[in-house]
Image (cartoon, helix red, strand yellow):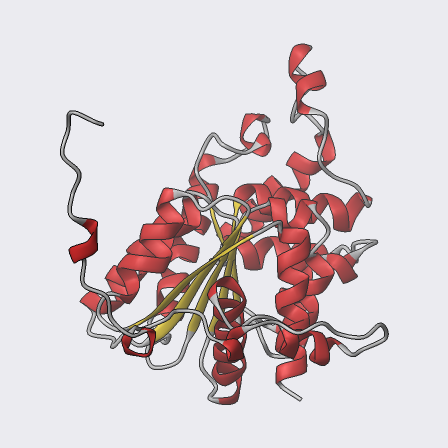
Amino acid sequence: MSRYPEIEIEKVKLYPIDQRHSKVKLDFLGEPVKSGSSFKDWWDSLPKILAADDLKSVVNDIVAAKENKKPVIVMMGAHVIKVGLSPVIIDLMEGGFITALAMNGAGVIHDVELSQFGKTSEDVAANIADGTFGMAKETGEFINLAVKKGRTDELGFGEAVGRELVRNEAKNLNVSLLGQAYKMEIPITVHVALGTDIIHQQPSADGAAIGDLSLRDFRIFARLVSDIGNGGVVLNFGSAVVLPEVFLKALTVARNLGFVCDNFTTANFDMIQHYRPRVNVVQRPTLSGGKGYQITGHHELMIPLMAMAVKEASI
C-alpha cells in the first residue's frame, strides 16, 4: 500500500450532459460528396466549424460588400504572383469582387517580368554567388523609367507602372495586375521599402522618384481605407511585414481625419500566421467593431478556393 494518501475521488460532483455546453454537435459535421458533384455541393458539405466556418464567413462578407458597394481591398505579397495567381485575382477584379489592390515593390518586379518577358523569379542562391543577382537590365530600366515618368505626371507608383505596361502593349498584358488594374481604372498602390528590391541596386534607380510615388500611393491607399466602415473588407495575401504596417498607418490617418472606420471584415491568408498580420490586420483594427479571421494554407490552394466560393455565392 502506498505511503501517500489519495484524493477522495468518489466525492466528485457529476451532472447531466444535457446541462453542459458542447462545442461540437451533429449538425456541425461534414458530409461526403459523390463523384461528379458540383462545387456548391462540396462547399455546402464542409464541416460547420473552425477554419471552414471562418472561410465561409469571409466569402459571405466579400459578396455582401460587393452588393452594398463597399470596398474590398486586397493587400498582397509578391509570392502570390510567383505561384501563378494573377489570373485568379484579375478575374475577381473583373467580377467586381476586388475594388483595390496594394502590393510591395517585389510584386511590381514579378508582375512586370511576367507581362513583359513571360518569366520571373531568378535563382537567387546561384546568382548572388557571382554578383549577378537582380542585375537583369530590362527589368530595372523599365520600372525605374516608368517611375520617373510618373513623377513628372504626379501619378502613384502602381498607376505609373501600369500605364507604361499598357502603353508598351506588354506581350502578356492579360496576366498583369498592374496593367489590368490600369485598364479597369481600379486603384493599385505600391508600397516600397527602399533597398529591398533588385531595381534599387541598378544605376537607373531614382530614390526621390521612388519615394515620391510610393508616398503618394500611401495617401491614395489611406483614402481607400477611409471607406471600409460598415461593411468593407480588407484581405491580406501573404505580406508578412510591409502591407500590415501600411494598413495600420492608413487606418490611423483615416480615423484621425474623422472617417468612421468600424464594423468591417479583415482576413489574413498565409501559409504561416506571422505576428504583424495577426495584430495589425486581424486584431487591432477590428477592436472597436468588426471581424478578423486567419486563414492558414498555401496560397495556390486557398486563394483559388476562396475565389471560386465567392463567385458561386454571388449567383
Q: Residue drawn 47% across and 30% down?
A: 195
Considering every residue shown, the one lying at the far top of the view is 130
> Could you tell me if residue 176 is visible in this image?
yes
10 lies above or below 312: above
* Rendering quarter of residue 119: top right
Q: Point out residue 315 in the picture as x, y percentages from the top left corner.
A: 67, 89
| 266 relative position to 66: left or right | left
> Could you tell me if residue 188 is visible in this image?
no
Q: Point out residue 164 in the picture as x, y percentages from the top left corner.
A: 67, 55
* Rendering quarter of residue 87: bottom right
220 lies above or below 172: below
Q: Which residue is at the front of the view, 86 or 302?
A: 302
Q: Residue drawn 19% across and 74% down?
A: 258
- The N terminus, quarter of image: top left
Q: Point out residue 274 in the picture as x, y percentages from the top left corner.
A: 42, 43
Q: Point out residue 187 in the picture as x, y percentages from the top left corner.
A: 52, 67
Q: Which residue is at the front of the view, 105 or 285?
A: 285
Q: How many marks?
A: 0
Q: Residue drawn 75% across and 58% down?
A: 175
291 lies above or below 150: below
47 lies above or below 133: below
Q: Which residue is at the front of the view, 148 or 31?
A: 31
